[in-house]
Image (cartoon, coloured by chain):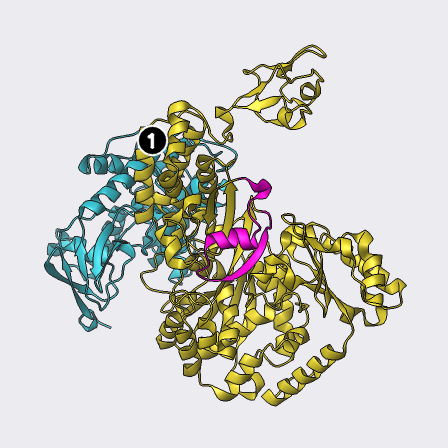
Chain colours: A cyan, B yellow
Amino acid sequence: MSWNDQQLIYISVEGKKISGFAGENLLEVINREGFEVPYLCHHPGLPAYGACRLCTIQIQTNGKTSLVASCTYPLREEELEVFPHTEEVWELRQMIIKLLLAQSPKAEIIQNLARQYRVEMTAQPENESEFVAGTKTTEALQEHQEKCILCGRCVRACGKLLGNNAISFASRGINRHVTPPLAEPPEACTGCGACFHVCPTGAIKMQMENNSLKIEPWQAEVNLFTCPGCGKQHFPKKNIQEVHSRINIDYKPDHDFAEANSLAELCPACRRKHTLAQGLASKTITKGMENIL
Amino acid sequence: MVKLKTPQELENLRASLQKQLKYSAKTISICYGSSCKASGAEEVITAIKNELEKNNLETNLERIIKETGCHGFCEQGPLVLIKPQNIFYCRVKPEDASRIVKKSIIKNEIIADLLFQDPQNENIFTTEEEIPFYKKQTRLLMQHNSDIDPRRLEDYLAQGGYSALNKVLTQNTPEEILEKVKSSGLRGRGGAGFPTGQKWESCRQAESEIKYLICNADEGDPGCFQDASLVEGNPHQVLEGMILGAYAVGITTGYIYIRYEYPVAVRNFREAIEQARDYGLLGENILDSGFSFDVQVKRGGGAFVCGESSALIASLEGRPGEPRDKYVRNTKKGLWGKPTLLNNVKTLASVPLIVEKGSDWFRQFGTSSSPGTMIFSLTGKIKHTGLVEIPMGISMHSLIWDIGGGIRNDKPLKAVQTGGPSGGCIPAANIDLPLDYEHLSNAGSMLGSGGMIVMDENTCMVDVARYFLSFTQQESCGKCVPCREGGKHLLHTLNKITRGEGQITDLTLIREISEAMQKGALCNLGRQAPNPVLTTLHYFENEYHRHIMDQKCPAGVCRHLISFYISTEDCTGCGKCMDVCPEEAIRGEKREPHHILQGECNRCGICQEVCPENAISKG
């Protein structure tokens, strides 16, 4: 189905008529029109989840008014009037931000939201539950807990999007936390870094260190490729293996530099140089094009 | 066992079973519900069996002794009924076995001291029907619990079971059944009260080749066991309801999701499914009608939240039991993305009755907006605890005094908590409130799954709110912020108040957080978790004030706010309190008045319990 086969739905937001496709979520549709509904657990690349409830808006349909989380509300054929910023909605968001601020006072995105919604920090209750995340509490884990808001973006990216399931939620209620299986270094982690990139609060750290890539607090450590061209370390080995196995390329780690699939081992800069050299040699690239590449 | 191939064969079998029943001698029906089992039903059964063997009656043991599902009067367990006269023996002990067999079975005599005696007026009742607890009930769903051995399909057939199915398959179209359920006005007994017919119709209209039916038997409310009593005690009635629902909606696969902690229910239902399959009442081409339907038992994951429909479906699919937003209903997109009909045990168990006897018959019970009966589990400070089935709309007063026998020790009633941990507390002043969906929800509580906890003056309402909230907090899945974080702060604030560290501004905070949870939480667990807090704050605000301003717990429950004193006048210096005190906080010479060191005392109250002179007071 091409995009113009999709059914167009018209809704009214604060009296303004806007449109979106059937099945799209309300949050993306109204934010596309500039209504600036805040959200934390949602990510355009991930399946909708509905955990942070910050994107709650007021809707009116069939004469009934209700509050719904816009990120999980699908656009469908119905008379829909949306009010993204009523007083009731504003008050609810204030309370949610207040709760999040108490949970993760150090997360910058929450601090900014608090300023925007004029929320002040209130006293934080001491945690009355015993925290069960594994036996060892590392410094990285503590730092993570101060920022993590349990939005589940990392879990969905790792599990639903990539199918790696190196991390997941464990326990329930106030003991809920994100952890690799058995709180041990995750074998399934390929070092792709998706969790790091989707985290809204910066609770996940990723850094390169002596030939390896570390992702904390998962204690994940994956080896990096050394670029055969320049000797720079550039990409997690396991991740390349994973990509190759998924696109069904028989991957040999110790093949010759000149072979075609070794391109994957080159760092981006060397790969460009290599392509250019090949092109010049086969005369598919003429001298004048050098600068463009 | 012969597979029944036509509706006529089923009727023939039923006729022969009923004939057998008519000419059979006496039967002993022993309640094997969880409460009676806990008070020793198992030993009673073994003792009676042994006694029967001694008297050479073991040849037709199966026919004489019936281990049945819950009879309802749990407080008086273990219960033994002698049929067909329905002689009601309560609090039976294994020692009574020989008397029961020799006198009641062989000789036809009644054993007077095992009969039920009303503690109020000391009247003695011989049969079950005469006892006020049973007399004032309208038992539709639980009617046959004491007649049926749940592990024998034949017993259910003899009581008229599967006749609704038989009638439907030969005479009715699915549309007619749907119409019947719709016009009966049956509403979901799981708590929300959504009209069942409407739900069925919406699922029937959903366009899909594959649809699923799920029976929700994941009853998790503390103190509730009516679903268990039906699944354990009369599984075929639930199964027949499921088959009828599947026929009306056009479903071929069904599941029953039974709570993990109900092993007997799981066993009985599994056996029921197998027997029904063997008889040809379940599976391919049921009774040669061309309609096929099969059911599987799924054991729950052991979480309260899995009773929530979307979490239940997630759990059934093998994922963690976490709810999702239900802006698209399960009847459109449920289990594995297919239209799914999800009903409570009691809802489905009502269906065979409606189909068999008609919607007008069903509407004569209950009110016009909430027809039918509801099973309540009466617990707390009430004289007669147990399962009670009454028509909707009866007043709470009548339930507590006419059936429940009033408050234990004749103390004044303080409040009634309805609807389990998500319900609210209704004060004694509103005791005439009719029990139906609308009235309870207008009072800030809910009908829920039918839990009813009666509280007397010795109950602290702040502590009650704190207790229920701590339950919903423990059982929260932790997915959404309002429930996880809001609940945490709410519980913390209530804990503070019960410790005497509360401030008057905390009450505003409680109201604000509660409102955010009600409006913002993802599922009904989070949305309804503040109900006990808000209702107690609304009806008993004074009690909160006493805790905060005076540092006193008027009911004498909150440990941090009470102290124990020994009256120097009454104390004889016997030293009993000194012996039991775990903190060694009591001092005093022999035969001299003792005293309590308040700094050391942990306020456990054991000293007050052991004092022979009642010299220790709480204040």
User: For the residue labelled by badge 1, is the local secondary structure a helix, a strand or a loop?
Assistant: helix
Highlighted magenta segment, given as a residue range: B383-411
Quick check: B19 above or below A260?
Answer: below
Is residue A275 toward the left or the right of residue B360 in the image? left
Q: Is residue B170 left or right of residue B79?
A: left
Viewer-proximal residue among B343 and B364: B364
Q: Is there any visible trace of residue B301 in the rendered image?
A: no
Q: Pointer 1: residues within 10 angstroms few (<14), some, or many (20+)?
A: some
* Residue A52 % position (x, y): 31, 46
State the residue at coordinates (70%, 17%).
B575
**Residue at the (81%, 60%) spot, across then down:** B100
Work out whether residue B264 or residue B61 is closer to the camera in this orientation and state it: B61
Residue at coordinates 27% horizontally, 62% vertically from top-left? A74
- Does B397 appear in magenta? yes
Q: Which residue is mark 1?
A: B506
* Residue A171 within the segment the image draws in magenta: no
Q: Amino acid at mark 1?
A: Asp
- Residue B430 can be seen, yes or no: yes
Q: Position of residue B433 (x, y in %)?
A: 41, 53
Camera-side residue: A49 or B206?
A: B206
* Residue B453: percent from left, percent from top: 51, 47
Q: Whole-percent x and y of residue B385? A: 59, 50
